[in-house]
Image (cartoon, grey):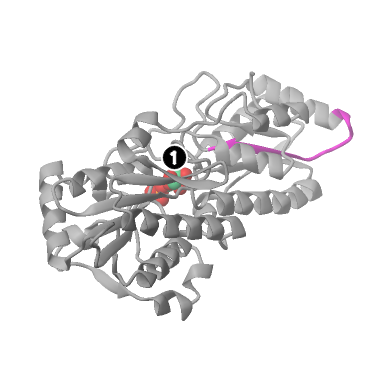
Amino acid sequence: MSNIKRIGVLTSGGDCAGLNAIMRAVVNSATEKGWEVYGIKNGTDGLTETPRAYEILTVENFSESPWPRLSGSYLGSINKGVKMGSLEEMSRRFAEGVKELGLDALVVIGGDGSMNIVSNYCKGTNIRMVGVPKTIDNDTPITRSSVGFSTAREVCEQAIDSLELTARSHNRAIIVEVMGRDAGHLAMHSALAGYADVCLVPEIPYSINNIIKKLKQIKATGRNHAIIVVSEGIKTEKGEHISNKKNLIGEAVYGGVGDYLSAELNARYKNFQTRVTTLGHLQRSGRPTAFDRLLGTLFGAGAVHLLANGENNKMIVWENDKVNAYDIEEVVKEGTTLLDVHSDYVNAAKAVGMYIGEI
Ligand code: F6P
């Protein structure tokens, strides 16, 4: 059993749909137990910066507002702060924040990277911590699904449906660039759901000539339009990085592969005009699907349940239709979950005649 009186909740990393569903579930479940909930603003910044940035959250915050039905993060998030400053310095500032706010436990809604960093900060305090996975990339280890993926997939599928209409009107091959970093889950799921002709993912090498072969086959059937889905993390045909862009902390910034592919196709094949649509951050802000609301609710309630049972340093996962939990170290050790090139998704794509690379 726990002696918890007050917990904190924060979102860290890139936003996505379903974050507010998780928060609502955390606040409602914690309130049921008689705990107070402090919503920490802007990731860990709300704890490590002064003045501390937080808001006392009550059931009314979510029942009297449309927030649980919207994407974005009610609390705000950061995609960098957890890595700014040395571990010692950040841990010290974090511990001061925790003490000042009188937190007994913390729910961190984020990717496994942010969870690992925050879990290290927590080790210097008496605070207990549980992580809830969210990412449109769906590459968090162990969990079958992360909150946000389902909505992003829906956004991509709807975009493909719309783009197919204009591709059809203008006899074009439209290249749809989707997010996902080094994992092709979002691209492959969207391509399957959007009935794409070609799907390129970082996990599978490809040949431009074979993409052209596919386009020629399409022409031969009398169809003059095509949809090519490309994951932002693909490399060139020769396996080189397409962009060298870096963010403020030196991490690779993805994006731009659609233009590379378009130029390569146009240079070698003149019978299909191409156009590129990069879906970008729209993928993070669709109306949360039923599944993301559901998973967010199960995960939020699950996080509070774990804390009430005295658990610490765990990440919630979705496994075989059940909410389970693993030690954060164990999750991190697994590394990023890439698209399984032998999965039924990949097999079905091949079976229906989609060109998915040299496999
Ligand atoms: O990890 C989520 C994600 O949306 C990736 O798919 C994408 O590459 C990245 O974040 C974009 O990050 P930012 O919002 O910092 O541009």
Q: Is residue 218 left or right of residue 291?
A: right
The answer, for residue 258, to whether it is visible in the render is no
Residue 73, given in percent of the width and then of the height, sits at 41, 63
Q: Which residues are magenta?
A: 220-231
Q: Report the front residue among 157 and 211.
A: 157
Q: Is residue 67 left or right of residue 164?
A: left
> Secondary structure under badge 1?
loop
The answer, for residue 324, to whether it is visible in the render is yes
Query: Which quarter of the figure is the N terminus placed in?
Result: bottom left
Q: Is residue 129 left or right of residue 157?
A: left
Residue 314, given in percent of the width and then of the height, sits at 33, 45
- Is residue 22 placed above or below 219 in the rendered structure? below
Looking at the rendering, which quadrant does residue 358 occupy?
Answer: top right
Look at mark 1 in the image and give the residue it sits on.
Answer: 140
Q: Amino acid at mark 1?
A: Thr
Q: Is residue 184 left or right of residue 299?
A: right
Q: Report the front residue among 349 and 200.
A: 349
Q: Residue furthest front?
A: 1
Q: Residue furthest right?
A: 222
> Residue at 37% across / 59% down in the picture?
304
Residue 336, given in percent of the width and then of the height, sits at 42, 33
- Magenta stretch: includes residue 226: yes
Query: Which quarter of the figure is the C terminus placed in?
Result: top right
Residue 226, given in percent of the width and then of the height, sits at 75, 39
> Residue at 83% across / 31% down in the picture?
219
> Residue at 61% across / 54% down in the picture?
155
